[in-house]
Every structure is written in C-alpha cells, then in structure tokens.
Image (spheres, helix red, strand yellow):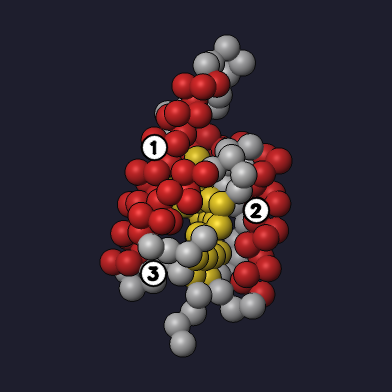
Amino acid sequence: MPRPHFLLVSYAAQGHINPTLQFAKCFIRIGAHVTFTTSLSARRRMTEVPKVEGLSFVTFLDGYDDRLKPNDDREKYGAEFKRRGKKNLNNLIASSNDQGKPITCIVYFLLITWAMEVAREQQIPC
C-alpha cells in the first residue's frame, strides 16, 4: 500500500501555523508524508522551518508577501488569499501527481474553506 500523503493548509497567522505543524507530526508518526503549505508572508515571520523527516514545506504568494499592514483592507486580503491560494493549491496537487506522490487527503482549518472546494474539484478526501 502506498504511503499516505497529507496536504495541510494553514492560515497565514502564527496562532494557526504552530498547531498545524504539531498536527503534521502526528501524521508523520504513523508513517505518512505531510506537505505543509501556507503563504510566503507567514513563512517570513517564522524564525525557522522545522526539519522533520516526512515533512515538506511549500509556500505560495498571497499578494502581501511583505506582511499585511494595519491599514490594508482585510476583505481584499481575504479575497486575494483565497484566489491565489486556490490556484497554488491546484498547482501543488498537479506537481505532486507528476512526481508520483499524489495527495491522498487535504486537511485545512476553519478560515480556509476554499481548500475544501479544491479538494472536491480534485476528488481528494478532506
């Protein structure tokens, strides 16, 4: 049986990233491979990316790569995060398929309902 490959999609905020990384380690402990994805702006706020066997870390551009600023329009940010996130998630799934490492399940968190839309379009359980 092929090794399960989970795609974990995290919101671009520190309060979401660390719990998602901890959750990823649970899947890794049972022998799965995990691809963790979030925006580049979130990655830039991290001091380091954990080096864990079985964990791949992939970022995508959300249009606010130098951080969301206090005066930025939050609705516009949400719309851009969704638009760019969906596009990049589809690209990531295609790339994984091309490499012979298909995503077997997508896990997303509350604010990222668009990940569920992608999962349904791609017929991947979530």
Query: Which badge, 1 or 3, comes first in the chain's sequence?
Result: 1
Above or below: residue 9 compared with residue 81:
below
> Can you tell which mark lies on residue 20?
2
The residue under label 3 is 102
Q: Secondary structure at mark 3?
A: loop
Residue 90 falls left or right of residue 105: left
- The structure residue drawn at horizontal position 46% and vertical position 87%, both measured from the top left corner, is 1
The residue under label 1 is 84
Query: Which residue of the protein is positioned furthest toward the left in this rendering?
Result: 98
Q: Position of residue 40 (x, y in %)?
A: 49, 39
Query: Which badge, 2 or 3, comes first in the chain's sequence?
Result: 2
Residue 64 falls left or right of residue 29: left
Marks 1 and 3 sit apart, C-alpha to C-alpha, by: 21 Å
Few, some or many C-alpha atoms within 10 Å of disc 1 (few <14, some 14-19, many ≥20)?
some
Few, some or many C-alpha atoms within 10 Å of disc 2 (few <14, some 14-19, many ≥20)?
many
- The structure residue drawn at horizontal position 46% and vertical position 69%, both measured from the top left corner, is 104
Residue 68 falls left or right of residue 59: right
Query: Which badge, 2 or 1, comes first in the chain's sequence?
Result: 2
Q: Secondary structure at mark 1?
A: helix
Above or below: residue 94 compared with residue 32:
above
Query: Which residue of the protein is positioned furthest toward the top in this rendering?
Result: 71
What kind of residue is marked 2? Thr
Whether residues under marks 2 and 1 lie with C-beta atoms below 8 angstroms apart, the answer is no
Q: Position of residue 77 (x, y in %)?
A: 49, 25
Marks 2 and 1 sit apart, C-alpha to C-alpha, by: 20 Å
Few, some or many C-alpha atoms within 10 Å of disc 3 (few <14, some 14-19, many ≥20)?
many
Q: Secondary structure at mark 2?
A: helix
